[in-house]
Image (cartoon, grey):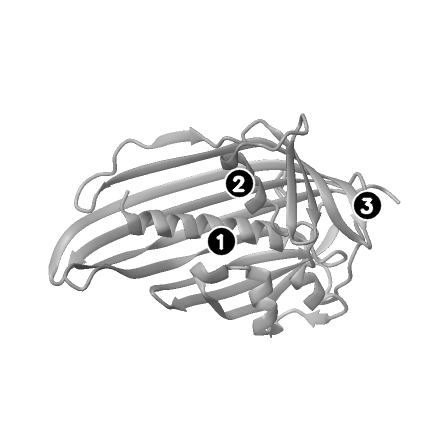
């Protein structure tokens, strides 16, 4: 896989993990049933409880075409297909000031599938590889800006496992920007809202690699009932770009379903184009690396809350 392909794959997987952490927690065990409810809603919140449990399911797919050129000469052209899937169960173990600060995470599934090939030929045979966290349990706690991660026996896990868990649990103990924005607001079907830049930046948490969110809009399409909970189904539109040494642009859209009473995401499906361009090398040997493709991110959620 070319360096540009590797960089873009890492960015897409980071984006997917961050979206999964910040938009809400969890997976649908059975297909959701949608029924029309009222025409407007007012959003509220629910404080977490010790013992709350959720199942998360994240699927990412990326098809990417890459090219490396020096001046006008094309040095390399290739294509990459990536799929990642993760299913995990997260149980709240400690709550402070109405915020979950510690959890137990059990990874039921965690695997990736990569296939590469020349741009003008077929992809090679896909390689399915289990991630090192598959089938394992971790205890995670936030202490200020630090995440403390231990395995089931209380030891610090190997670095490759630690990095995956840290990325997945990045939002633990932090405010939920989307809930902070929506709580208390009343919206009618058909209404559009644009998240302020500072809210969108906190929600996406893209960091330096993905630059700035330039647009994050939601349109309330309809009010539905999912597993007995009133939910708002939005059509979302997100754009982000970076214009530093590594130019990048992505534009994704798709449905985002949020529980009205909790501001937690139940389902999210984003798809759209992504492109990167980067210049490397010295003055005497400069290489231009570009990558263009399409990404799909699907997040589904099922919550099992402690009864009060």
Asked if residue 149 is positioned above or below residue 206 in the image, the reply reads: above
Residue drawn at (69%, 47%), measured in percent from left and top?
A: 142
* Residue 91, picture quadrant: top right
Q: Is residue 183 left or right of residue 273?
A: right
| Disc with the residue nearer the chain's start (2 vs 1) | 1
Which residue corresponds to mark 1?
15
Which residue corresponds to mark 3?
49
Q: Residue furthest right?
A: 308
* Residue 31, picture quadrant: top right
Residue 48 rendering spot, x and y as whole percentages: 79, 49
Which residue corresponds to mark 2?
164
Q: Is residue 169 left or right of residue 83?
A: right
Residue 128 rendering spot, x and y as whole percentages: 39, 30
- Disc 3, SS: loop
- Residue 130 visible from this viewpoint: yes
Asked if residue 142 is positioned above or below residue 277 in the image, the reply reads: above
Image depth: mark 2 or mark 1 in front: 2
Residue drawn at (49%, 55%), measured in percent from left and top?
A: 270
> 193 or 246: which is nearer to us?
246
Q: Do the residues bearing badges 3 and 2 touch, measured as CB atoms within 8 Å? A: no
- Residue 33 visible from this viewpoint: no
- Disc 1, SS: helix
Q: Is residue 89 left or right of residue 215?
A: right
* Residue 283, picture quadrant: bottom left
> 238 or 203: which is nearer to us?
203
Residue 29 rendering spot, x and y as whole percentages: 63, 37
| Disc with the residue nearer the chain's start (3 vs 2) | 3
Image depth: mark 3 or mark 2 in front: 2
- Disc 2, SS: helix
Instruction: Report the Cα–Cα distance between label 2 and label 1.
Output: 13 Å
Instruction: Report the Cα–Cα distance between label 1 and label 3.
Output: 28 Å
């Amino acid at each position: 896989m070319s360096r540009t392909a590797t960089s873009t794959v890492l960015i897409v997987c980071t984006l997917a993990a961050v979206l999964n952490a910040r938009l809400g927690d969890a997976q649908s065990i059975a297909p959701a049933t949608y029924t029309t409810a009222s025409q407007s809603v007012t959003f509220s919140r629910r404080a977490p409880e010790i013992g709350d449990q959720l199942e998360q399911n994240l699927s990412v797919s990326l098809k990417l075409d890459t090219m490396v050129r020096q001046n006008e000469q094309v040095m390399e052209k290739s294509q990459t297909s990536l799929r990642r899937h993760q299913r995990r169960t997260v149980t709240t173990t400690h709550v402070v000031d109405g915020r979950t600060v510690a959890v137990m995470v059990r990874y039921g599934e965690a695997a990736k599938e990569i296939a590469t090939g020349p741009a003008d030929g077929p992809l090679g045979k896909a390689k399915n590889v289990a991630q090192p966290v598959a089938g394992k349990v971790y205890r995670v706690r936030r202490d200020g800006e630090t995440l403390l991660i231990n395995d089931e026996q209380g030891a610090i896990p190997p670095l490759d496992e630690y990095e995956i868990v840290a990325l997945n649990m990045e939002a633990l103990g932090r405010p939920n920007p989307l809930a902070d924005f929506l709580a208390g607001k009343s919206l009618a079907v058909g209404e559009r809202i644009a998240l302020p830049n500072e809210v969108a930046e906190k929600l996406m948490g893209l960091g330096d690699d993905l630059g700035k969110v330039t647009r994050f809009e939601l349109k309330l399409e309809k009010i539905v009932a999912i597993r007995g909970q009133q939910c708002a189904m939005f059509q979302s539109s997100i754009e982000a770009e970076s214009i530093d040494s590594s130019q990048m642009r992505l534009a994704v859209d798709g449905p985002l379903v949020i529980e009205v009473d909790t501001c937690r995401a139940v389902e999210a499906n984003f798809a759209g184009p992504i492109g990167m361009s980067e210049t490397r090398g010295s003055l005497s040997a400069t290489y231009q690396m570009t990558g263009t493709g399409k990404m799909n991110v699907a997040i589904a959620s099922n919550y099992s809350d402690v009864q009060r």
